[in-house]
Amino acid sequence: MSWQEKWIAFKTILNREIRRYMRIWLQTLIPPAITTGLYFVIFGNLIGSRIGEMGGYDYMQFIVPGLIMMAVITNSYANVVASFYNTKFQRHIEEMLVSPLPNYIILTGYILGGVSRGIIVGIIVTIMSLFFSDLVVENILITITVVFLTAVLFSIFGFINAVFANSFDDISIVPTFILTPLTYLGGVFYSINLLPEFWRSVSMANPILYMVNTFRYGILGVSDIDITWAFVAIIIFIVGFYMYALHLLNSGRGIRS
């Protein structure tokens, strides 16, 4: 295939993914905003007024970056895992696999579809957060970069989960038993400096901690971890899992009957 044909194929997959969740925007874009709004009210206003400051900032300001990142993570992941599993279930994937379209184009199209939904939801949640706190971005480059990389990483996770899923129940196992606990223990609502030494060391093994803290550094200028190593870790994860996802697609594992 020529590069023009590959580009057209890539745009087709990406446009289909975007139109898929935009067509049902009341189910895909609005619920995350409502859920996050409840977090702002309950944790920010009600509980936050009793906690006071954390990390040198008002508690509401402290949790805003984590809540935005949590919305980006869950929605970029959910978009790809649901979309690709439906493609498997309805046998649409076989039409793409027998075409001359390279598998990396298919994979990248699904990933960027998930990224687009994660970023859109992140923007919606960010706008909502302005009604609860004064949000001033300290470093716009770090903020945008870490959001994009995080959305890419969890879109890849969603793709891998969809490959191994054999039923609709399987696509909810990882979010329920892995993604949600890691998110809540990833420093969204607290600073790991408050933890005892042992639990602080355990928290350092949580990859979401690095993403949340890097994003918080981009917005507030404070972080519990080294930002440089956080970026290195995220990029390594992206490259490693992208290659693994591409290998699964090339081998047809979980896809071909």
Image (tube, rainbow, N blue to C red):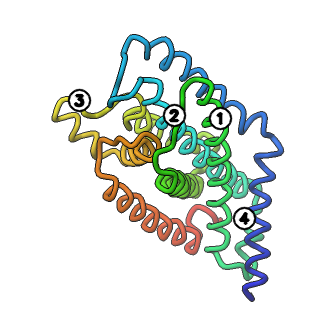
The residue labelled by disc 2 is 67
Tell me which numbered mark, 2 or 1, is placed earlier along the sequence.
Answer: 2
Q: Nearer the viewer, mark 3 or mark 1?
A: 1
Tell me which numbered mark, 4 or 1, is placed earlier along the sequence.
Answer: 4
What is the C-alpha distance between the residues marked 2 and 1? 12 Å
What is the C-alpha distance between the residues marked 4 and 1? 36 Å
Identified by mark 1, the residue type is Ile
Q: Are marks 3 and 4 in contact (CB under 8 Å)?
A: no
Tell me which numbered mark, 4 or 2, is placed earlier along the sequence.
Answer: 2
- Binning the other alpha carbons within 10 Å of mark 3 as few (below 14), some (14 to 19) or many (20 upward) gives few
The residue labelled by disc 1 is 127
What is the C-alpha distance between the residues marked 2 and 3? 20 Å
The residue labelled by disc 3 is 195
Tell me which numbered mark, 3 or 4, is placed earlier along the sequence.
Answer: 4
Residue 184 % position (x, y): 42, 32
Identified by mark 4, the residue type is Ile
Q: Residue at x 47, y 24 (%)?
A: 60
Horizontal side, residue 113 vs residue 192: left or right: right
Q: Nearer the viewer, mark 4 or mark 2?
A: 2
Q: Nearer the viewer, mark 2 or mark 1?
A: 1
The reply to whether residue 50 is in sight is yes
Tell me which numbered mark, 3 or 1, is placed earlier along the sequence.
Answer: 1
- Binning the other alpha carbons within 10 Å of mark 2 as few (below 14), some (14 to 19) or many (20 upward) gives many
Q: Are marks 3 and 1 in contact (CB under 8 Å)?
A: no
What is the C-alpha distance between the residues marked 4 and 2? 34 Å
The residue labelled by disc 4 is 93
- Binning the other alpha carbons within 10 Å of mark 4 as few (below 14), some (14 to 19) or many (20 upward) gives some
Horizontal side, residue 185 vs residue 81: left or right: left
Depth check: 257 or 121 in front?
121
